[in-house]
Image: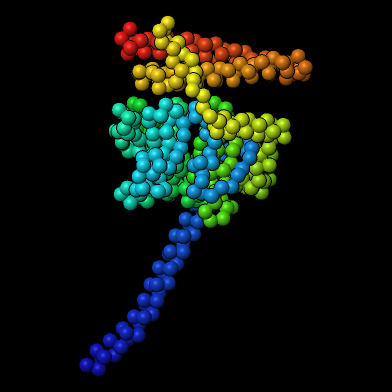
Amino acid sequence: MKGKFILVSALIAVLPVSMDAQKRKSNVKAKAKQTVVDKEFELRLEGMRAATQKVMFVDSVVVNKSKLLKSLNIPDESGSVTDYNSFFETTEQPNAVVYLNQLKNKCVFSKYADNGWGLYSSELIGGKWANTMPLEGLDMAGNDVDINWPFLLSDGTTLYFAAKGEESIGGYDIFMTRYDESTGAYLKPENIGMPFNSTSNDYFYVVDEFDGYGWFATDRNQPEGSVCIYSFILNNVRENYNQDAYTPEQLKQLSELHSISMTWTDESSRKHALEQLAEIAKRKHSVQKKNDFTFVINDKYTYTTLTDFKSADAAEKYARLNDILRQKAKLDNSMELARDAYPNAKPQQQEQYREQLLAAEKQSQRYETEIAVLTKEIRSIELKKLGN
C-alpha cells in the first residue's frame, strides 16, 4: 500500500510538469507555423511588388464610403453602378452593388446568401428582372470567401470584382476573369496585383475603355468610413516598373501608391488627362438629348434611341457598332495628330511615326469593314423583326 501511495504521488508530481511541457511544445509549434505563414506572406508581397504595374494616376478624391457609387463618373457607354436596394426597390441587401450594362437589359450584382457574398446575373424580360443565376467559375481558395463590387466591360465577358479571402493580401483585393462560352462559366479569377491591391481594402475597379480612363477605390491610408477614388490612364499593353531603374524604397512606394505624383511621366500628359476627365464628368451629368443617335433602317424607319429597336439582337449589335465607331474616330484623330507632328520630328521619331501610321491605317480599314458588315446585319435583323 505504501508503495502504491509513493507511485501515485510521483505521478501527481510529474503530471503538471508534463502538461506544461506539452503546452510549451504546442506554443512552439504554433509560433513556428505562424512564422512560416508570415514568411510566405512576405515572399508573396515581394513577388507582387516586383511585378508592380506601371500606371499613370491622374487624380484622387476622398469621399465617404456611402457615397462611393454616386461619386464614380462612369460614362453611360460603359454602363452604370448603383446599390442593390435602390435598383431592386428593397431593403434586404444594404451593402450589395449592381452593375447595369449599357443596353440596360442585363445586370451583374452581389448578394449576401448562405453566410457569404457572391455574384449573380439577371436579364430584363418583359419589363421584369428574370433568370437570376449565380456566376459559375468564380471558385477561389479557402472556405470563407466574400465577393462583391462587380464591373463588366462592354465586351460582356471581362469581369472585375473585389474578393476577400486567402487569395487576397489585405481585406478585399481586386480580381479579373473572363467568361468562357464553351463551358458556360468564368475562368479562374486572377489578382490584378499592385498598385491596385494592397494590405488594406481595395473595392472597385471600373473602366471607360472608349476614352481610355479608369477608376478604382481603396480605404488605404484613410480614416474609418472613408475611401479614396483614384483616376488613371489605361494602358494598351501592361508594363511593369523596371526594377533596375528604381531603388527598393521607390519600388515599395510605387507599389503602395505612396504619392500619385511619382507616376507622372510629364505634366502636359497629366494636364491633358485632367481636362478629358472633366469633360467626361460634364458629359455624365449633362441632360441627355432625346435623340442619342441616328440610324436609318430603311426609308420608313429611322431610329434615334436603343429602345427603338424591336430586336434585342439588333440592339446589341448596334451597341457594338457604336463602340467601333467611337474607337475608329479616336484612332483617326490620333493619326491626324501623328501626321501633323511628322514633318517637324527627328529622323528616328519620323520612323516611329511611319510605323505607327501604317499599323493604324490597317486597323482603321478593319474597322471600316466591320462597320459595313454590322450595319448590314442590324438592318437585316431589324427588318425581319418588323416583318419587312
Nearest the eye: 342 or 330: 330
Q: How far from the left and from the top, in percent, is residue 99? A: 43, 36
Q: Which image quarter holds the N terminus?
A: bottom left
- Asked if residue 175 is positioned above or below residue 19 in the image, the reply reads above
Q: In this orientation, does residue 119 appear?
A: no
Tell me where residue 85 appears, x and y as whole percent. Answer: 39, 44
Classify the position of the C terminus by image quarter: top left
Q: Is residue 384 visible?
A: yes
Describe residue 312's horizontal placement relative to residue 153 as left or right: left
Q: Is residue 355 above or below residue 51?
A: above
Residue at 76% from the left image edge and 14% from the top image edge? 343
In the rendered view, how is the structure colored?
A: rainbow
x and y percentages locating residue 351 in the rendered image? 70, 16
Q: Is residue 365 above or below residue 146?
A: above
Residue 261 percent location from the top left of the image: 68, 42
Dividing the picture into quarters, in which one does residue 319 lie? top left
- Please tell me which residue is depicted at 31% across the width and 36% down the height of the picture: 133
Farthest residue in the left direction? 1
Q: Residue at x 69, y 33 (%)?
A: 271
